[in-house]
Image (cartoon, helix red, strand yellow):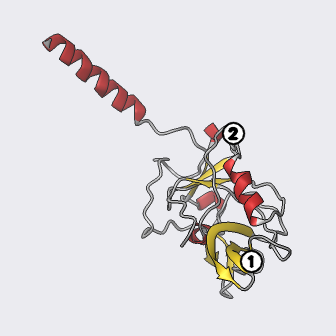
């Protein structure tokens, strides 16, 4: 009995030790590569070479990026297809990026979290970001909705080219068409 307990303790210690080894990720910053999310921290990114915030995940075929500031994992290169909101949400649901499922549309706060303001005050992506985003882009849908309004239920988007945060109709003849930039992790609340 005592011998069995010692064996279980030794195996548990081994599993905990081996399980806590950081993954092999591409980054120019010194480790650790594990997410240390805290919405009150700010990891300064001036250039891609000096950005400790974003880590391109080589163990996900370089198709995903870990944001160490928020703990979210983003698609590195979203597909440049404009869709109505429902189709964008559906495309994330069945997306396989880096060999992983479990993607979703980000909330408006999450989309804004990868942005910064340029000297003129416009919304742009963080200067040291490693994302391969289609340019020009009409913007990206969020899961954050508002409604009902006279135009129907609206959903917010983010356009990093001109800095807009549009609220567009999700359905109907006047439905907006934006791209889906899928994310994993976080709360993913649909309604705000």
**Callout 2: few (<14), some (14-19), or many (20+) C-alpha neighbours within 10 Å?**
few
Q: Earlier in the sequence, mark 1 or mark 2?
A: 2
At a point 72% along the width and 86% down the height, the residue shown is 150
> What percent of the width, then of the height, locates residue 59?
62, 37
At a point 50% along the width and 47% down the height, the residue shown is 33
> Residue 31 has which mark?
none
Q: Is residue 125 left or right of residue 28?
A: right
Secondary-structure class at tag 1: strand
Q: Quadrant of residue 132?
A: bottom right
| Nearest the eye: 87 or 55 | 87
| Nearest the eye: 140 or 145 | 145
Instruction: Please determine whether, in this image, residue 66 is positioned above or below residue 86.
Output: above
> What percent of the width, then of the height, locates residue 143?
63, 66
At a point 64% along the width and 40% down the height, the residue shown is 100
Q: Which residue lies most toward the bottom here?
A: 120
Q: Quadrant of residue 133?
A: bottom right
| Nearest the eye: 12 or 83 | 83
Q: Is residue 38 left or right of residue 179?
A: left
Residue hosting label 2: 61
At a point 67% along the width and 50% down the height, the residue shown is 93
Tag 1 near tag 2, CB within 8 Å: no
> What percent of the width, then of the height, locates residue 27?
59, 49
> Residue 168 has which mark?
1
Q: In this rendering, does residue 163 appear at all? A: no
> What percent of the width, then of the height, locates residue 80?
83, 59
Observer-side mark, 1 or 2, equals: 1
Q: Quadrant of the C terminus?
A: bottom right
Q: In this rendering, does residue 116 appear at all? A: yes
């Amino acid at each position: 009995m005592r011998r069995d307990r010692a064996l279980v303790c030794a195996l548990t210690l081994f599993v905990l030790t081996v399980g806590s080894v950081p993954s092999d990720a591409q980054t120019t910053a010194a480790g650790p590569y594990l997410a240390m999310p805290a919405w009150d921290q700010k990891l300064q990114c001036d250039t891609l070479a000096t950005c400790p915030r974003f880590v391109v995940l080589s163990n996900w075929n370089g198709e995903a990026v870990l944001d160490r500031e928020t703990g979210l994992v983003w698609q590195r290169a979203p597909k440049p297809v404009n869709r109505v909101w429902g189709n964008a949400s559906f495309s994330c649901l069945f997306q396989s990026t880096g060999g992983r499922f479990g993607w979703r549309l980000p909330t408006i706060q999450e989309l804004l979290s990868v942005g910064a303001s340029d000297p003129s005050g416009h919304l742009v992506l963080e200067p040291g970001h490693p994302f391969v985003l289609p340019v020009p882009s009409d913007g990206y849908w969020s899961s954050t909705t508002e409604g009902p309004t006279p135009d129907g239920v609206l959903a917010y988007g983010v356009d990093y080219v001109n800095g807009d945060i549009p609220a567009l109709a999700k359905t109907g003849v006047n439905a907006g068409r934006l791209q889906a930039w899928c994310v994993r992790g976080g709360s993913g609340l649909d309604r705000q």
